[in-house]
Image: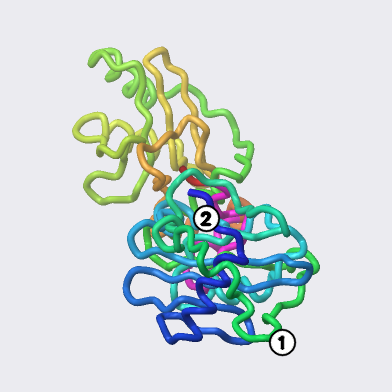
Amino acid sequence: MTIPPPDLLWAHGAVRAALGRGFSLDAEGVASEDIGNGWWRLFWGEGGRAVLLGFDNDYSDTAVGGPPLDLLADAPDWLPWERVTTHLHRDWPVGFVYWWDGSSWGRTSYTCEDGAESTLPTDDGELAEQAGLAGGSVRPEVPAGRGEPPGRKVPWDGLPEVHATIVGSAMKRAEERSRPVRPPSEALSAVVEFLRANGQDEILAGYIGDQHLPYREPQGPFVKGELGTLLDALRAHEADPESGRWLYVRVTADGRVSRAYDTLPDWWHPSTEHTWAWPDMLKLELASRAEPWRPDWEWLLDAAALGDGVPPDLCAKTRS
């Protein structure tokens, strides 16, 4: 879809606001009313620039799944940052933010549906000459911004599954601390022998803390039966009272082992955007480590510490 230029959107909304047809006009700009389908708002900036934001209740896939999407990633310095951020942190979700530089629309990168196509009007050429509404009137403008404000936060919905993806994003960016090389052991040999006997090339397992089925594979299935018991024995054998126990392990049938204690490793590829980071389990695990061995992302495990916003570097910069 091609987003109509702001002059046309302004005409569409302003005329309807004047006629009392589902739009309002205020000192900030023009906005549609949410009647259960979605909404959009347009406001003008200095120099003929404009900002458009909105949400569709059915098609704004940008607002669901995975870590929060930073809709202001790569936004220009002139964006009215504080005003836009205020809208993003209100009680209703936002599925798209577009900025008009005087000649074309821009937005952050994604390929999924953002809801603009179903929420915005199609061509409305008959209104193009009516944007002024009345002779001598001046459309409202908001001051230009001066660059992205420090400490900006991206809103999130507080859902446990989204919390897990935020923690997973931090774990992906973290660096693995060096630990002593683990020597060969009977516990490791038992896992390798099981793989060979059962024709498995490797096992990738993540510890989730469940009492009965504590390990999962990247695609989601639990590690059951004897192999789960063997992994438990290996993890217990390799535990260190100071630096803790591994969270993810990869064991191959030829005896190679990769372990991750602080990070979501490159070889862990889940089947969904949920990154298999379990905050409640991680709280318990990290509490058992000595202070120097706790990763910098530990503070994220308390959802309340995030408040109503997530640092942009932990958000998705694109979504498909």
What range of the chain is rendered magenta?
Answer: 297-318
Res 164 visible: no
- In the rendered structure, the answer to whether residue 223 lies left or right of residue 130 reads left
Q: Quadrant of residue 157?
A: bottom left
Q: Residue 259 location, x and y as percent?
A: 49, 33
Above or below, comparing residue 85 to residue 196 in the picture: below
Answer left or right for 269 relative to 144: left
Considering the numbered disc 2 on the image, is that residue within a helix, a strand or a loop? loop
Mark toward the start of the polypeptide (2 vs 1): 2
2 or 1: mark nearer the eye? 1
Relative to the observer, which residue lies in front, 246 or 14? 14
Q: Is residue 244 left or right of residue 152?
A: left
| Looking at the image, residue 104 lies above or below residue 131 | above
Magenta span has 27?
no
Q: Nearer the viewer, residue 160 or 13?
A: 13
- Residue most toward the left? 225
Colour scheme in the image?
A: rainbow
Image coords of residue 169 (percent x, y): 53, 49
Label number found at residue 136: 1
Q: Residue at x 23, y 16 (%)?
A: 198
Name the residue rendered at 49%, 43% in the picture: 111
**Pointer 2 with pointer 1, Cβ within 8 A:** no
Q: Give the CA separation, mark 2 to mark 1.
A: 41 Å
Q: Which residue is mark 2?
A: 69
Q: Is residue 118 visible?
A: yes
Q: Residue placed at 31% from the left, 39% from the top? A: 216
